[in-house]
Amino acid sequence: MQIDIITPDHTVFSGDVVSATFPGTKGSFQVLNNHAPLISTLERGQIKVRTNQDEKSWEVDGGVVEVLNNKITVLAEAILGK
């Protein structure tokens, strides 16, 4: 599935992933292929993605995530520590 992680000033990551984990406002959650449509707010925490080659993570300072038709769009307020 495709993921795009975007902040107001740049694209942090764009590519195919096997899974993604997010710090949701009501708790952490994971998205896998063919996940049901979803919109959620994010709180400060780790976004973790697993590709076929490796794992990547970013510290996010809030935002919104949308999952629809095997495409994940993350609008992050800020990526911390980068």
Image (cartoon, grey):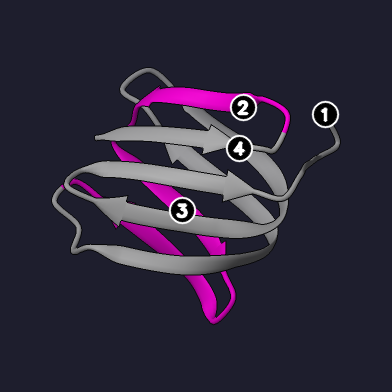
Residue positioned 58% across, 35% down in the render: 6
| Residue that mark 1 sits on | 82
Q: Quadrant of residue 4?
A: top left
| Residue that mark 3 sits on | 21
Q: Which residues are magenta?
A: 9-33
In the rendered structure, which disc, 3 or 1, sits on the residue that comes first in sequence?
3
In the rendered structure, which disc, 4 or 1, sits on the residue that comes first in sequence?
4
Amino acid at pointer 4:
Ser
* Mark 4 → mark 1, Cα distance in angstroms: 11 Å
Point out residue 27 in the picture as x, y percentages from the top left corner.
54, 77
In the image, 9: left or right of 73? right
| Residue that mark 2 sits on | 12
* Magenta residue check for 62: no
* Mark 1 → mark 2, Cα distance in angstroms: 10 Å
Quadrant (top left/top right/bottom left/bottom right) for the C terminus: top right
In the rendered structure, which disc, 2 or 4, sits on the residue that comes first in sequence?
2
Nearest to viewer (mark 4 / mark 1): 1
SS type, badge 2: strand
In the rendered structure, which disc, 1 or 2, sits on the residue that comes first in sequence?
2
SS type, badge 4: strand
Amino acid at pointer 2:
Val
